[in-house]
């Protein structure tokens, strides 16, 4: 890992790495052993931002990051959740065609490997999940949908996700889950938080 550092005002430092896999490894290591004075750690697709208590701690935090050994296969401190899914998505057949798998094999691939929440974005509670079966790396749809139902389980560009609410979207829909992944009355409101392990399980259609 060869991180690049960018100052974000007086009280934050942006650490840029090569890919989302390095983001996950660095985030897990930093949350397990936060540098002194760091109050918040926020991952994104290729960056991890660290906020700290006092201004002008950039050099101290930078040194702490450089001395951090990224996590490799360790058990996440963020916990694990299992999400039952009915695999009836409108794009399931298209995903099967894109991957060369049967629809049953797509389901087996999606449920057979645990995923990790790399970061959140797009909408509150929308977790970008990585680390699944590499055969499920499919592109976004060529045309986005105006309306994707809440709870839709989808794939795109190596990620999987569960839509937290009805919204437009261009991901490939493979099923739906009857779970609330964003609840403003809960603490924390997001079910899927960075660092969490996520397992999908096939559920029977009601």
Image (tube, grey):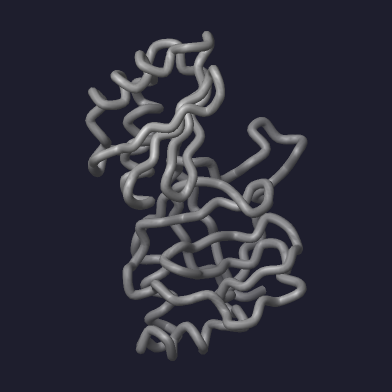
**Residue 70 sits in which quadrant?**
top left
Against 74, residue 83 (above or below) is below
122 horizontally vs 71: left or right: right
Asked if 33 appears above or below 177 in the picture, the reply is above
The quadrant of the picture occupied by the N terminus is top left
Residue at the outermost top position: 54
Q: Where does residue 131 sit, x and y in percent of width and height? A: 35, 57
Q: Nearer the viewer, residue 160 or 56?
A: 56
Can residue 43 be seen here? yes
- Residue 11 in percent (x, y) is at 53, 18
What residue is shown at x 59% (from left), y 79% (from top)?
Answer: 88
**Residue found 67% across the figure and 31% down from its top:** 187
Q: Is residue 117 in view? A: no
> Could you tell me which residue is drawn at 45 percent across and 52 percent down?
198
Could you say where residue 20 lies in the image, as x and y percent from the top left?
A: 38, 51
List x then y, in percent, for residue 25.
31, 41
Question: What's the residue at 63%, 41% (across, down)?
Answer: 190
Q: Quadrant of residue 6?
A: top left
State left or right for residue 4 relative to residue 44.
left
Tell me the quarter of the image containing the C terminus. Answer: bottom right
**Location of residue 189 with respect to 197 vertically, above or below:** above
Relative placement, left or right, of 51 versus 75 is right
| Number of on-image labels | 0
Q: Nearer the viewer, residue 195 or 47?
A: 47
Q: Nearer the viewer, residue 91 or 22?
A: 22
């Amino acid at each position: 890992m060869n991180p690049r550092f960018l100052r974000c005002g007086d009280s934050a430092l942006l650490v840029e790495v090569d890919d989302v896999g390095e983001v996950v490894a660095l985030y897990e290591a930093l949350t397990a052993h936060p540098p002194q004075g760091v109050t918040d750690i926020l991952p994104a697709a290729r960056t991890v931002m660290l906020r700290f208590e006092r201004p002008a701690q950039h050099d101290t935090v930078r040194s702490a990051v450089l001395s951090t050994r990224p996590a490799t296969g360790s058990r996440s401190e963020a916990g694990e959740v299992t999400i039952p899914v009915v695999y009836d998505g409108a794009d399931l057949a298209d995903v099967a065609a894109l991957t060369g798998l049967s629809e049953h094999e797509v389901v087996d691939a999606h449920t057979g490997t645990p995923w990790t929440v790399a970061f959140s974005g797009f909408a509150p509670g929308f977790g970008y999940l990585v680390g699944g079966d590499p055969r499920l790396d499919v592109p976004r749809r060529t045309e986005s949908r105006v309306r994707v139902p809440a709870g839709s389980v989808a794939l795109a560009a190596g990620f999987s996700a569960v839509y937290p609410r009805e919204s437009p979207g261009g991901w490939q829909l493979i099923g739906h889950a009857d779970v609330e992944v964003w609840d403003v009355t809960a603490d924390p409101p997001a079910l899927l938080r960075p660092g969490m392990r996520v397992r999908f399980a096939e559920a029977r259609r009601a």
